[in-house]
Image: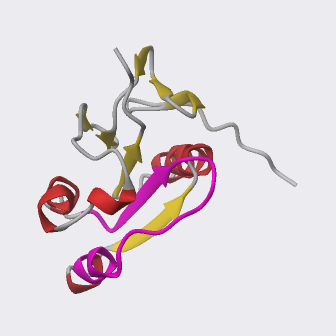
């Protein structure tokens, strides 16, 4: 069996994830964000799946990805049915996963040069 090591190229790469933070390349983020190979939208206004609607998913769909991976929490959950219909109508795949699974999946998709976006929903931090 031939093994190939996938290393980050000239795209964003997730190095680590905790329930309330994600390290992308050399920067740590503590707020929800949208991530693509060459796209980083920090401070996405979503803090739970229930907040997803036509307005809050627009930043994901405007980039015409073939697939969007949503990562939230430590237990798998799903967005409202209306949101799933929005993605279906745009012919964009939608996968919902835990934060760590979504981050691993994103790294694999980027190593395959897929046209995918990651939406990470992190809880708000008390100041």
- Is 23 left, or right, of 124 in this rendering? right
- Is 15 left, or right, of 70 in this rendering? right
| Residue at the front extreme of this rendering | 126
Of 26 and 37, which appears nearest the observer? 26
| Numbered label tally | 0
Residue shown at 27% from the left, 80% from the top: 82
Of 4 and 87, which appears nearest the observer? 87
Residue shown at 34% from the left, 44% from the top: 47
- The N terminus is located in which quarter? bottom right
In the rendered image, residue 125, in percent from the top left (x then y), is placed at 39, 24
Residue 75 among magenta residues: yes
- The C terminus is located in which quarter? top left
Up/down of 65 relative to 40, above or below: below
Up/down of 102 relative to 90, above or below: above
In the rendered image, residue 118, in percent from the top left (x then y), is placed at 38, 50
Residue shown at 21% from the left, 60% from the top: 57
In the rendered image, residue 29, in percent from the top left (x then y), is placed at 39, 23
Which span of residues is magenta-colored? 65-86
């Amino acid at each position: 069996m031939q093994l190939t090591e996938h290393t980050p190229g000239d795209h964003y790469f997730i190095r680590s994830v905790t329930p309330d933070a994600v390290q992308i390349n050399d920067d740590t983020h503590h707020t929800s964000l949208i991530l693509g190979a060459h796209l980083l939208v920090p401070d996405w206004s979503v803090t739970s799946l229930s907040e997803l609607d036509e307005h809050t998913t627009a930043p994901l769909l405007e980039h015409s990805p073939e697939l969007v991976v949503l990562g939230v929490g430590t237990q798998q959950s799903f967005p409202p049915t209306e949101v799933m219909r929005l993605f279906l109508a745009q012919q964009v795949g939608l996968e919902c996963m835990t934060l760590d699974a979504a981050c691993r999946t994103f790294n694999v998709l980027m190593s395959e040069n897929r046209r995918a976006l990651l939406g990470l929903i992190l809880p708000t931090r008390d100041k």
